[in-house]
Image (cartoon, rainbow, N blue to C red):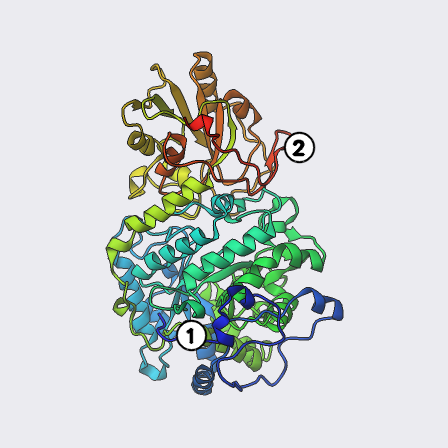
Amino acid sequence: MKKSLFLSAAACLIFAACATTGSSQAQSAPVTPSKPSVPLSAPLSAQADKIWPAVKSPIGLDAGIETRIDALLAQMNTAQKVGQLIQPEIKNISPDDAAKYNIGSVLNGGGSWPTGKVDGPLAGWLALANRFYGASMDTGDGRLAIPIIWGTDAVHGHNNVQGATIFPHNIGLGAANNPGLMRDIGTATAREVAVTGIDWAFAPTVAVARDIRWGRSYESYSSDPKIVAELSKEILLGLQGHPALGNFLSEQKLVATAKHFIGDGGTAGGKDQGNTVLSEQELFDIHGQGYVQTIGAGVQTVMASFNSWNGNKLHGSKYMLTDVLKGKMGFDGFVIGDWNGHEQIPGCTKSSCAAAINAGVDMIMVPDDWKAFLDNAVRQVNAGEISQARLDDAVRRILRVKMRAGMFDDGKPSTQRLAGRAKLIGHKSHRAVARQAVRESLVLLKNDNALPISKRANVIVAGSGADSPSMQSGGWTLTWQGRDVADEKYKGFTTVKDGFEQAISSGTVTSDTATAADVAVIVFGETPYAEMEGDLQNTDFDLTSSADFKLMQSLKARNIPVVAVFLSGRPRGVDAAIQASDAFVAAWLPGSEGGGLADVLVEGDYNFKGKLPFDWPANGSGQYKPRGYGLTYTAAARQ
């Protein structure tokens, strides 16, 4: 990645200043880039102009980069330009095709690996990155050398890669609410992604979930926009770096993405990809704060959202993507579409959508029908359906980000500093950060003198989640939905039961629920899911057919204290389980470092720190505990 930096306005030495409103983009030198023949963004109404701030990025335009872009654009024909706008999935394109069609980007979706197998050799990632890079830099047949950029959904660590450190999902990080820790998580994630030669992470998610029936609620830090904004900024600084830190897009950093613009967490009924019905002021106040902070910290890409705002699909909203985001807010990176998100625009299909490009989507994520989309887009430019000015603007933005990242100058992926250093995948220092995140994310909802557990206790650790890497991790882990992978494929994981076996020093740990014990820890909860498949009709968790709940009841009947540990991507109505237990812990989706639970539940150096990032619902209706609630051990309980 990039070695040199682009500074502006004293490098925004106070990070908060980078997110304040201002009237113009800060610049590192006077710049007069080529201007489109027609304005691409329109002035906002007086009312809207007061709602949306002008955000001062710490990066600023660079005269040398803009001149290089001018020179490249002058050499490119329409097909070459359109090729830069296309992002296929690696399963559906070869490096040779990437060269032939001048493709600007590829991605690997959840559950897509270079070798076609989850347990394929780690070196396969870097080898394929080299092949795509080499193809994109091949100047045969009149092609131009423009490096391809590879994007991946590294949303809680490098989660498609076997053996990587898997951090708690965002909801757990919101419960921890530790900004400094977020920066460490971003740093560790960027390092592990860099090992595989990938340039770009589709993170952070800055969604503000307002209805936890939404199947992506665990991708939201909190229902509080202020928490979301602060944590998003900090993880971005870890992922991408910052001029004031001297590491903006340096060798151990990567291009980051703020997603999904805008209102993804506010859909009616929590319906994924649904309709967010809000006034413009409410949309900004609730769902815009994360973008103020991430643009102010220099984020280089923004992903358009599947949802609609007041009935209009965001992928087709020129007002939001161009007039607001790029015009008023001053975002000068590029907008990436989501997975075939363009096809949801009225009149569009997977293989044809001038409307998305015209609205302001600069790069189209078109996983499979990319050849047809490219052909149609070339035809649409030639027919005037997409203006040359709009095409050039999209290409300019993509080239600008690639140049800022040093991709034109740094050579093939395998020559980068961290490339191929397999020992960094799941490195002990990264796992230590993840384990701290687990400890700080735990929220204690109830404790009737059952916690902490003595190191000398005889402990039953049982339940469907006690020894389950997939339940600990949830969706977006090895596969898209986080399912259909055998436990042994989760390399480097410490389960909850493993953690207790390490923490209990002179007592015993068993999964035999028929044995006598001083206490039983029953780990239960949601099975993995991701977007679309995770939506709920209501928040109640079904305990009537739950073997875990029946186990709690049977243990209580034997006068064995029960500590219930709930693994979930959101709060759920589990009133009966809370009542049946002596202590109840919301553990969210802790990821690979399940040992962090025993660190806190067993007597020792750690106390509960987590606070509810969302209201916790009661069964049927109402509220069991409000956002911000969370018990801690008293001094007496720790003696």
| Residues at marks 1 and 2, CA–CA distance in whole angstroms | 50 Å
Residue at which label 1 appears: 404
Residue 302 location (% of width, % of height):
52, 64
Disc 2 marks a residue whose amino acid type is Gly
Along the line of sight, which residue is nearer the eye, 605 or 474? 605
Along the line of sight, which residue is nearer the eye, 291 or 217? 291
The residue located at (46%, 78%) in the rendering is 81
The residue tagged with tag 1: helix, strand or loop?
A: helix
The residue tagged with tag 2: helix, strand or loop?
A: loop
Along the line of sight, which residue is nearer the eye, 535 or 288? 288
The residue located at (60%, 39%) in the rendering is 615
Residue at which label 2 appears: 622
Residue 263 location (% of width, % of height):
61, 55
For the C terminus, the image quarter is top left
Of callouts 1 and 2, the N-terminal one:
1
Residue 196 seen in the current view: no
Residue 167 location (% of width, % of height):
40, 47
